[in-house]
Amino acid sequence: MGIFDGKTTRRRVLKGGAALAGGALVAPTVFSRGAWAQNFRNDPGDSGSVTFGFNVPQTGPYAEEGADELRAYQLAVKHLNGEGDGGMLNTMKPLALKGNGVLGKKVEYVTGDTQTKSDAARASARRMIERDGVVMVTGGSSSGVAVAVQSLCQEMGIIYMNGLTHANDTTGKDRRRYGFRHFFNAHMSAAALGPVLKQEMGTDRRSYMLVADYNWGWSVEESMTKVTEDMGWETVQSVRTPLGAGDFSQYLTPVLDSGADVLFLIHYGKDMVDSLTQAVQFGMRDRQANGKNFEIVVPLYSELMAQGAGKAVSGIYGSSNWLWSLNNEGSQAFAKSFGQEYGFPPSQAAHTCYVQALLYANAVESVGTFYPVEVIKFLEGFEFDGMGNGPTLYRAEDHQCFKPVLVVKGAENPQTQFDLLELVQEVPTEQITYPHDLYPGDLGPYEV
Amino acid sequence: MDALLLQLLNGLDKGGAYALIALGLTLVFGTLGVVNFAHGALFMLGAFVAVAVNRLLSFSVQVRDESITFFEAYKQQPYLEIWFGDLGLAVIAWSVPISILVAIPVMLLIGLAMERGLIQFFYKRSHAEQILVTFGLAIVIGEIVKVLFGANPIPVQAPPAVAGPAPLGAWLGLSENLVYPWWRLIYLFTSLLIIAAVFAFLQFTTYGMVVRAGMADRETVGLLGINIQRRFTVVFGIAAIVAGVAGAMYVPILPPDYNLGMNFLVLSFVVVVVGGMGSLPGAVAAGFLLGVIQSFASMGAVKDILPGIDQIIIYLVAVAVLLARPRGLMGRKGVMET
Amino acid sequence: MASITEFNPSTPKKDLLIMAVFTAVVLTAPIWLAPIGASYPDLLQRFAIFGIFAIGFNILFGLTGYLSFGHAAFLGIGSYSAVWMFKLFSMNALLAMAFGIFVAALFALVIGFICLRRSGIYFAILTLAFAQMAYNMAYSVLTPITNGETALTLDVADPRIIDRAILGDAKEALPSPSLFGLELTGFTSFYFCAVMLILAFWVSLKIFRSPFGLKLLAMKSNQNRMQYTGYNTKPYLLVAFVISGMYAGLAGSLMAVTDPLAGAERMQWTASGEVVLMTILGGAGTLFGPLFGAAIIKYFENIFSALNKTQLTEVFGFLPDGMAEALASVSLLFVGEGWHLTLGIMFMLVVIFLPGGLMEGIYRLTARVKRKRESGGAVSGGAVQPSE
């Protein structure tokens, strides 16, 4: 019945060094760690299946993004179990997975609703860990949730593969040994956008920033200000706006008279849709200021939300982790199997989640055990390709993926209903790489 | 100077929306004595009437895009365009104004159905139970909309002629930077019109007079042999229309999603209470007051002195007003005080 | 409306029995909740914590009729205080709870003093305004204290002055909240919450039975009359408000004990609204009602939301394939991402058919059974009145 297999008991067992579960299935790489390493939380043991936990927003403003993440996870499970066309399993390099589940165990999954609230997200993750016995939790579509669940997973000794989270903190100040992020971050957005903006808009620009008033907004503001000022732009003013303001007119009208000629809308999701729609109504896309074309920049695009802004996005610059229309093997393999399954192309949220699920499974298969410490050590410094972003590195020091970043803009003449964003430039990895101690943090211990 | 003028406009514009929602809510409080937590849902439904009208008008023939092979992408051409050419496109472009006209009968029906089907059984029940049942209703309405339209916000543009900014500065001989979106000016104007119409109805028609009498003393009016009940049903319908039209008109400004009602719920109650329970002029005055104050509090100069003031100003004003005036700006004694 | 009067008159003996049964039921919860998939520490803790929150809310709303729409603020304040206690001084759960309750009481005293100058909906909006201000500030401007969106969490490098003084510089791993060395994680942590719930319930029972409780109830029915008879009602109301704020503070600090994190969303109006709904759903003014309401809403939130298509198809697996698929798709409207819909429908059904909440349903049921016994089975359908 297992009521009392909580943390305390497990620790006691570990400390005692006792309890060698029967039939020790020790993989070569685990050998050096000693056999007791097998005693970890939610060890699938001899069971024929293994459970993943998909923790995504199903209610609230990001429900659509969560639904897309869930679609991607379900597809990943299919591919892992050898069903469907295999998707990126055909393109991933190096690949240990065989299409027969993970370590021969069939992959099953449970789902939960984060509600985009840290409390609800943690409750849901704890249910997965305590009741459903998952070996790994993944998902999420905001940095608040990411940081909260990541630290919970660290305490519980369960690996957390972040979904969509863009704040620097996730792999900066709040990085955790058990948490991994494939998605890019605010620093990379700014580093990638900088040169492109310089090229498109010149070096003599005056910018005005509207910033969502919470951690993510501030981190983008900080990164963006630094990059633009380094290339000679002047920041006229930076105004913080409350989350979920709805009507942004009172923050937009001062822009008109400020002498600025570039407006940064550092908003995500619904706020981005609202502020962008309204900025366009104030004529800001077609304005002239200081003898130049007035420009709007949205540092982080979400294509699902861009649909909500409709025609307002056309011609507006931003950055993105991935686009379904990318012309490489991995992207096409994924877009194809996703498109055939669901009838429309995947979003960048779906992509990052799919990749994260595969990366975890591949790591387990490679080290031959679900023992998280070995899985973590494998992922740290793991280099791979064929997942849609080109050659990618999981940096060991902060568990952040490094890969090219896309600068995109809203399509001017969309051909179909799916042509929302078009690629402007793929910024190479070297340009967006930064030292791991730029945002200092502590990963914490391997053993918990 | 320009900045102040623009902020005043912003405030009035917000105030227009607040006032319209609060007006309907007060009508329902004042006449039926019902705390209607589903009033925000009516606003949201109005917005989705606009979305639905747009969808209907732009119903399209789907032409497969052969360039995309692995899922079915379509180029769309609306039937109206095929049948009527540019005239058809113009009709689609004007879908929001059209939907305002559609919203009136639709919202009236929804309002009547809600009152007859549910609300009428809760007149004599405690406020707590009214809150629970209408909150449940609001959730159900929201979830139905989510199933039908998805969770994402849906954009519907204002007609091209009024989608951009109006050169306000040029008209007034001020700076050219002084522009204001046409649609927001229209919104403000229309909301004033609706407010005036509701007041005129209550003030100058016999029907309205009886309703007002009923608000003041329901029992006596009932004793006079007037079927006050039916009139109250009609009033609920009017409240639904006002909320729905306010919602439909708001679509170009704020692409609606199924949560829109909940986002406005708290605010609308604050507005009504600051205005004073049971007072229609109070609700309107409070709507505009809070809108304008909120706009001014968001100005950079104010925020430099008091960071974050724009986030709490509405509540701060609410506390101040309620402490200075026990029953809000114009509330009547004894209404909803127990 | 079902009211407290049903429990009065009560005898100490009967109360003792109530307490004994209640204690037994709570402590055996992990066993009898197992069949419905609710027997894991996190959810059990949530039942207990939100039970405490709702019981406390009921002391104010159920007894005095004052509807606070901002009670979540005290929950949040309790959480923040407890986490700060963990960070600065000690991981001892009792210290954190004491501090959480104390700070919540302080805030409740000030906010209550201001808000209680008004009544009815004016009171409700005043409390709402204070809670929303707290939420908005915590999310943004007060980030240095609250850590804003990412929530306040523990850090290995926290000072923990008392712990370090006693235990020395300990391990590199993050410590868990403890009770004099006993680590409060997993089921240990649930039993800790369960004991707190039993204590909280006992205090609430005592208040309901006391002359103080009776005076509050009298104010609910007619405050003016109370004032005419020479009572200054304000102090009584304020005491009730503060007690109920302390319950919220206790619940908030327990949340921090079971999971050392404090986020601003805990103070949002939706959280305040939730406790109102819990109380009304279960039955305001009844002893057990709020507990039922809290458990049901939390059960929906955690279990119904987690059902997905594969699980449903398995459930309907005994049916032919096509039919199972179809049934699973229909049910999916009500669970998983549609769990809100079920919640909304339940709110409506309960309040339409059971004025007075779930407790009312239980009364009707017991009354019916009693009658059946007395009259040998002849019951006229539905006409049974609650025993007022």
Image (cartoon, coloured by chain):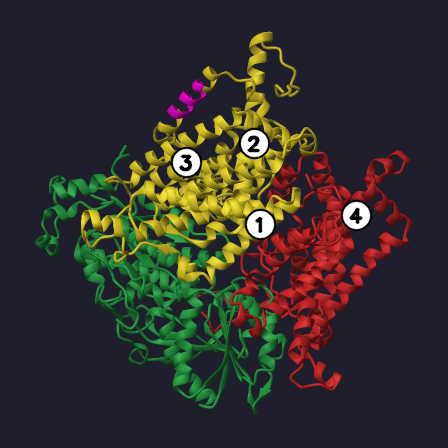
Q: Could you say where residue A354 lies in the image, as x and y percent from the top left?
A: 35, 60
Q: Which residue is mark 3?
A: C48
Chain depicted in yellow:
C
Tell me the amino acid under the disc marked 1.
Leu
Q: Which residue is mark 1?
A: C128
- Name the quarter where the N terminus of chain A is drawn: top left
**Which residues are drawn in magenta?**
C16-24
Q: Are marks 3 and 2 on the same chain?
A: yes
Contact check, label 1 and label 4, Cβ < 8 Å: no
Task: Tell whether C118 sits left or right of A351.
Answer: right
Nearer the camera: disc 3 or disc 1 = 1
Marks 3/4: CA–CA distance: 45 Å
Parent chain of label 3: C
From the viewer's side, name the closer residue of B102 and C163: C163
Marks 1/2: CA–CA distance: 22 Å
Q: Colour of chain B?
A: red
Tell me the amino acid under the disc marked 2.
Gly
Is residue A412 shown above or below C29? below
Q: Could you say where residue A196 lies in the image, as x and y percent from the top left?
A: 42, 84
Marks 2/4: CA–CA distance: 31 Å
Q: Are marks 1 and 2 on the same chain?
A: yes
Nearer the camera: disc 1 or disc 4 = 1
Magenta span: chief secondary structure:
helix
Parent chain of label 1: C
Marks 3/2: CA–CA distance: 18 Å
- Identify the element where label 1 is drawn: helix
| Residue A101 visible from this viewpoint | no
In terms of image quadrants, where is residue C281? top right
